[in-house]
Amino acid sequence: MQFNPGRLISTVAKVDATSIKESKCFLCTQNLPPAQLGIPCDGEFLVLCNPFPIFPEHFTISSLRHTPQLIRNSFATLLHLTRELGTRYTVLYNWPRCGASAPDHLHFQAGNRSYLPIDAEYEAMKQNGASQLAQSGSLRACSIENCLRRHITLESPDAELLQRAFGALYEVFQDGGPAGEEPMLNILGFYTNAEWRVHFFPRAKHRPAFYFKEGDQKLLISPAAVELGGICTTPREQDFERVTREHIVDMYNEVCVSAEKFAGIKTRLASSLAAL
């Protein structure tokens, strides 16, 4: 758990269409605070210091164009950024109703790699009951369910192959969802020893039930990629003092897809990856 009062704005952010339309986009260059300088990246993105950091070094990597937060055609960019940032950083993607507080402006985040528990714990997770979905050529895919949050992991040194595998994964995640809408999803990307490791967390809900309660039962925790990586933040000290293990377990159970739906995802994805 991390008490981080600076995260209040993003934790309570309204991401419905009306609220977004009525507010200025804080990632557009003309709306950035004068003190928030950035480093251009590939002529398409701007690397900014996150003003309310969770990591010791925390960056927002935003598109120079005001374009929606969609991953279907931006996954190659995530892979590129992950490789360019190297072994020191993790790259994060949050879908609009899964933690992104600027759903109308494409952006990623990056932070110190060793800070997220999932990085150090991944090999143990794999050995403790992971299901192998694919292992052919240079692609490895597995599903993990024994760490409170169910997710799929792809590993490969081949960016093109990863993009094809992501296309298959995307279609499976989207199946049964609202027509024309991207699946609810968080992503964490790592790059080590000349290969990628990318974790995909299919979501069922934006926020847990305790977020909407009143009085002492309310906890302001709005899980995004960081929380799914193992660091849970809250901007209110009273929540930091009151949160229990049971709260966190319930939160993961609520916001991640159910065991039944995840079983279907695994079956369909294994079939799709076999056809690559």
Image: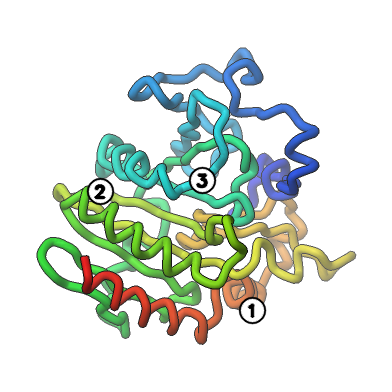
Q: Which residue lies furthest to the right in this view?
A: 215
Q: Position of residue 79 (x, y in %)?
A: 31, 44
Q: Quadrant of the C terminus?
A: bottom left
**Element carrying mark 3:** loop
**Element carrying mark 2:** strand
Q: Which colour scheme is used?
A: rainbow
Q: In this view, does 217 lie to the left or right of 184?
A: right
Mark 1 residue crowding within 10 angstroms, few (<14) / some (14–19) / many (20+): few
Residue 189: tell me if it is visible: yes
Mark 2 residue crowding within 10 angstroms, few (<14) / some (14–19) / many (20+): many
Compare residues 76 and 94 and report the one nearer the observer.
76
Q: In which quarter of the image is the N terminus?
A: bottom right
Amino acid type for the residue under numbered disc 1: Glu
Foreground: disc 3 or disc 1: 3
- Where 215 sits versus 259, above or below? above
Foreground: disc 3 or disc 2: 3
Amino acid type for the residue under numbered disc 2: Tyr
Q: Is residue 1 left or right of residue 23?
A: left
Residue 70 — which label?
Answer: 3
Q: Position of residue 261 (x, y in %)?
A: 51, 81
Q: Residue furthest front?
A: 179
Mark 3 vs mark 2, CA separation in Å:
22 Å
Mark 1 vs mark 2, CA separation in Å:
33 Å
**Element carrying mark 1:** helix
Amino acid type for the residue under numbered disc 3: Leu
Report the residue marked by disc 1. Answer: 246
Q: Which residue lies furthest to the left in this view?
A: 137
Mark 3 residue crowding within 10 angstroms, few (<14) / some (14–19) / many (20+): many
Quick one: label 1 or label 2, which is nearer the N terminus?
2
Report the residue marked by disc 2. Answer: 191
